[in-house]
Image (tube, helix red, strand yellow):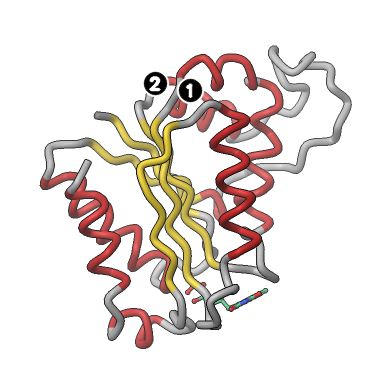
Amino acid sequence: MKITVLMGSPNRNGSTGILVKEFVRGAEEAGHTCDVIDVCHADIHPCIGCVRCGYEGPCVQKDDVEMIRNKLLASDMVVFATPLYYYGMSAQLKTVIDRFCAYNSSLNSRHLKSALLTVAWNAEDWTFDALETHYKTLVRYIGLEDMGMVLGYGCGTPAMTKHSRVPQEAYQLGRSL
Ligand SMILES: Cc1cc2nc3c(=O)[nH]c(=O)nc-3n(C[C@H](O)[C@H](O)[C@H](O)COP(=O)(O)O)c2cc1C
């Protein structure tokens, strides 16, 4: 299976990155191919809402979204990886998702498998409620097939994350595919 990981943390060696590395390690051991796209350091502009794409067609903005589009449409699975920012995903990852607008139908018809990898400082049981609901709503709307979520409660720093069971969970998820 071809897996595209949308890495939505600006910290390449941060907690989200730890989960991504472990997920990829597991998935590659299971025989899959992973392509990690560092969306925070790519040239990606927010959707300007002109809808000249008609929700399926060329976007007026010429940036790295075209590369992401081509990779996603050639994939079997998409992984959303993000730190929790004010109880949602990072703005950088959300920007990529908003730009799905120009290939909405194509993406929908792919019925990709999907997963969520996320980390947060807080460890209260409600920490990921909003993000989880958002992710599940995207799964439903885009016609994805959810393969699992790794919710990193209490993963506020790389040291906290490394000392938790969360990297192991990410590895297991990749390995289980
Ligand atoms: C702008 C910003 C907003 C954040 N919002 C939250 C939050 O709402 N809840 C929370 O528990 N942690 C929050 N955090 C903490 C991060 O989710 C946490 O430190 C995470 O480990 C960062 O991941 P990274 O190492 O990949 O950057 C926030 C951090 C930043 C920089």
Residue found at x 48% / y 48%: 80
| Residue beneath disc 1 | 70
Tell whether 80 sits left or right of 140.
left
Ligand 1 shown in quarter: bottom right
**Cα gap from disc 1 to disc 2, whole angstroms:** 6 Å
Q: Depth check: 60 or 54 in front? A: 54
Tell whether 142 sits left or right of 173.
right
Q: Work out which residue is located at the far front of the displayed protein and give it.
A: 125
Q: Quadrant of the N terminus?
A: top left
Q: Is residue 158 above or below residue 150?
A: below
Q: Is residue 100 above or below residue 119?
A: above
Q: Depth check: 81 or 42 in front? A: 81
| Residue beneath disc 2 | 74
Residue found at x 68% / y 34%: 99
Residue found at x 28% / y 40%: 34
What amino acid does circle 2 point to?
Ala
**Residues tagged 1 and 2 counted as in contact (Cβ below 8 A):** yes
What amino acid does circle 1 point to?
Asn
Q: Residue 104 location, x and y as percent?
A: 64, 21
Q: Secondary structure at mark 2?
A: loop
